Image (spheres, grey):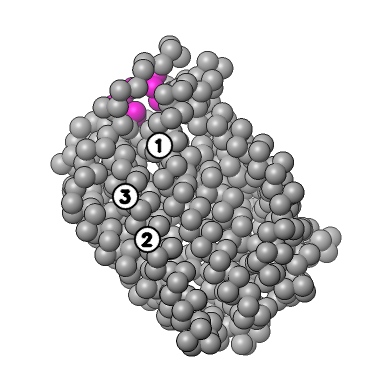
Amino acid sequence: MAGKLSAFFGAQDMTVGNPATNLIRFSTPLLIGNLAQQLYSTVDSIVVGNYVGDSALAAIGASGPIINLLLVLFMGVSVGASIMASQCFGAKDKKRLSHSAGTAITATFAVSIFVMVVGPLITHPIMSALQTPQDIYTMSCDYLIINFLGILGSAYYNIISGILRGLGDSVMPLIFLLVACGMNIGLDIWFVAGFKMGVAGAAWATIISQAVSGILCLVRLLLMRDVLHITWRTLWPTKALLFQLIRLGLPSGLTQAVFSLAMLVVQSLTNSFGTTIIAVSTVVMRVDGFAMMPNFTFGTATTTFTGQNIGAGRLDRVEKGTKDGLKLGLSVSVVLVALILFFGRYLMEMFTSTPDVIDTGMHMMRILSIGYIAMAVTQILSGVMRGAGDTMTPMWISLITTIVIRVPIAYGLAALMHSADALFISLLISWVMGAVLTSIAFRMGRWKKKSIINDDVPEPADV
C-alpha cells in the first residue's frame, strides 16, 4: 500500500506501461487542476458580477488580455522547464535535471522582480491606449496593478508545477492548487462581499492564494531528493542550461505573447462596441476557459509523455501515445462542447442576471462550438512536437493563425457586418486553420530529430 501511495503522489515514469493508461492517469489530476486554476479568474468574475455589477465584471475583462500577456513570460519558461525535466528524467540524468530546475527557479525570480517594478508604472498608459471606457477605467487599473505586484506567487506556481509535470507528478500540484483555490473563494467573498473592496478585493484574494500555491510547489520540489537535488550550486544558472531553457521556452512564450498582443488589439475592437459587449466577451471567455480545458490538459500530458519517451529513446511509444491522446482529447471535447451548448446558459447566469448579456453570450458560444474540436487536434499534436524539443513549429503556426488570420479577419468582418459577431467568427476561423496547419507539420515529421538529450551541452558541476 505504501508503495502504491508513493507512486501515486510521486514522479510517474511514462516510459513503461500502456500509453493510454499513462495519459489518463497523468491527465486526470491535471484536468482537475486546470479546472481549479480556471476558477481563480472565474470566481473573481462571479463574485464581482453578483456583488458589484456588470461594470465591475467588464473591468476585470478589460484587464484580462494584459494579465495574460504578463503570464506568458512565465508560461514560456514553464514549457521549457517541463521539456528539460521530462527528457532528463526519461534519460535518468539526475545531475542535469537538478541544474535545469535550479536555473528555471532563478530565472523566474529575476523576471518576476522586473515585472513587479515596471508593471505598475505602465498600467495607466496601456489602459488609456486600449480606449478603456471611462466608467470602468479606474477599476481596471486597480485590478491590473495589484496583479502586477503579486506576480511572483503565480510565476512560481506555473514554473515549478511545470517542472513537476515534467517529472510525471500531476497530483501534488493539483492538491496545492485546490488548497489555494479554496482560499481564493473564501477571500473573494470576504474582501468583496464583506469588506466591500470591489475589484481590488478580488485581485488581492487572487494573488494571496497564488502565493500560497507557489510556496507549496517550491517546498515540494525541494523535498524530492530521490529524483533531483536543489542546492545553492544548482540555483546558480549555467550559461548552457539557461540558453537551452530560453531556446525551448522562448518560442512558446513568444507564441503566447503574440496571441495576447493580438487579444489586446481585438480588445480595443471589443471596447468600441461598448460596456455590454465587453461584459459579454468576459463571460464567454470564462466559459471558453472550461471548454478549452481538455485540449490544454491532453496537450500538456502528451508533452510530458513525449519528453520522457524521447529521452529514453522510445519513439515507438510516442507514436502510440499520440494516437491514444487524439482519441481521448477528441472524445472529451465533443462531450464537453455538447454540455456547454445545452447548459451554457446556466453557467452564464452565475456571472450575471442581465438577459441581454446571457442571450448574446450563448449566441457567441454557438459560433465558437466547432472550434473546440479543432483545437483538440492542435493542442495534442503541438504537445507532441514540444515534448520532442520542437517548440519552433507550433510557434510559427500560432503566429500565422493569430497575426495573418485572426486580427485582419476580425477588423474586416467588423467593418462589413457592423456586429460583434466578427470577434468570434474570426476566432473560429483561426482555430480551424491552426488545426489544418498543425496536422500538416506533424505529418512532415521534423520534430522527431529535436531531442535536447543529444545537444552538446557541457556537463554541469556535481550537485
Determine the main secondary structure of the stretch shown in magenta: helix
Viewer-proximal residue among 104 and 410: 410
Segment tinted magenta in the rendering = 88-97
Which residue is depicted at the point 46% across and 28% down? 242
Give the residue pinned by disc 2.
400
Which residue is depicted at the point 34% across and 28% down? 88
Give the residue pinned by disc 3.
393
Left or right: 369, with 110 as reference point? left
Assign a secondary structure to mark 2. Answer: helix
Left or right: 417, with 391 as reference point? right
Expressed as whole percent of the image width and height from the top left, the position of residue 25 reads 34, 47
Is residue 352 located in the magenta-colored stretch of the structure?
no
Label 2 environment density (alpha carbons within 10 Å; few <14, some 14–19, many ≥20): some
Q: In the picture, residue 100 is in which quadrant? A: top left
Expressed as whole percent of the image width and height from the top left, the position of residue 82 reads 41, 38
Assign a secondary structure to mark 1. Answer: helix
Q: Amino acid at mark 2?
A: Ile
